[in-house]
Image (spheres, rainbow, N blue to C red):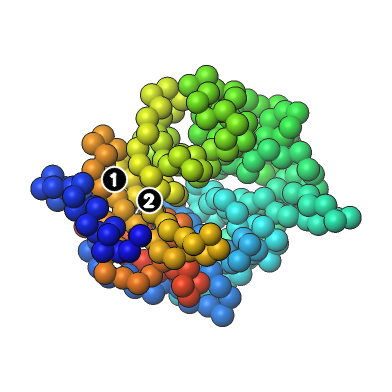
Amino acid sequence: MTKQTFLTLALSMLGVAAMAQPRSASEPTLLIKSSQGLMAPVWSPSGDKIAVTSDNYDGIWVADADGSNLRQVTCCSGAGYKMQWSADGTKLLGRTNVVSDNRVFHEVKVWNAADGAETTLVGKTRELTGTPLWNDAERVMISGERDASSVNTRSLKRTSATAADVYTMMVNDPAGVADKVASLKEFSGAIIINPALSHDGKQVAFQVPGKGIFTCNSDGSGVAYLCKGSHPAWLPDNSLIYTVVTDNGESFTGSDIYAVDVATGKAVLLTANTDMIPLTPAVTRDGKRVAFENAKDACIYEITLKY
């Protein structure tokens, strides 16, 4: 689909009411460039730092909010896949890949964002069903094939635990959550990916490959289809941004970032008139800045939003 087609479609959906939605206040500007291809940005909770990873999610780098002072935190394979900041913005949590005897194992680690000092929470295993998730500033929720547990990042004490909400279950067990939550039974057999928790903790947006983006309440009730797209991310007013990507079966041929009102389904195109291929958008908690990777040059760019 061409950008003009995207724009025409978006405008036909919007009407006058769309002016209340966020729109791009600036053309995309370069935020981080490196000799290493970069992808999948994640803002720290306060927005003063941003973490990125490289091809195949290998390694983690951290830069200041303006893109300066880029430094490598870890070179671990797979560390950047669904990496997460701690609530205080001092640590990063990730699941790494370890190849042994031609088999891939995983480890769960926490890194100090300032100096890269690492702590291994779970050693080499093949039992993880998803990615780890911060419970609070010190504890991490981990789900395995046999049980779920909470690990204290200071004492390394591991205790049995049960996921308290659907969002945690989606992160910890993307392939199994639809069979465990009655309201998600329509997705049985599918993998639920890219879950995102709203700022007020009351709603979850998630993606089902081939079906699009859906929302539900934090207890799993009220499942509703929202739109075609991928990688939803919440804005402070409980609207969402997401990407619509086109490909030729081998590589991405186009992409745009939209904002959508969850209540009405009305969408606004945020990246008109650019030849970039924006992927994996990340929003600062104040909803003012959106960082994304550009598949064309493997650099990180940003747009600023105006409401």
Q: Is residue 29 above or below residue 217?
A: below
In this view, the residue farthest toward the right is: 101
Helix, strand or loop at mark 2: strand
Position of the N terminus, as image quadrant, is bottom left
Find residue 147 and report its horizontal and vertical position in percent: 72, 28
Query: Label 1 amino acid?
Result: Val
Q: Is residue 39 at least partly visible in the picture? A: no
Find residue 229 and report its horizontal and vertical position in percent: 40, 48
Helix, strand or loop at mark 1: strand
Which tag, 1 or 2, sits closer to the chain's start? Answer: 2
Q: At 36% across and 66% down in the image, what residue appears?
A: 302
Where on the picture, by quarter, is residue 30? bottom left
Of residues 156 and 165, which is closer to you in this image? 165
Q: Is residue 238 at least partly visible in the picture? A: yes
Say which residue label 1 marks. Answer: 260
Labels 1 and 2 touching (C-beta < 8 A): yes
Q: At 35% across and 37% down in the image, what residue appears?
A: 226
Of residues 18 and 67, which is closer to you in this image? 18
Say which residue label 2 marks. Answer: 242
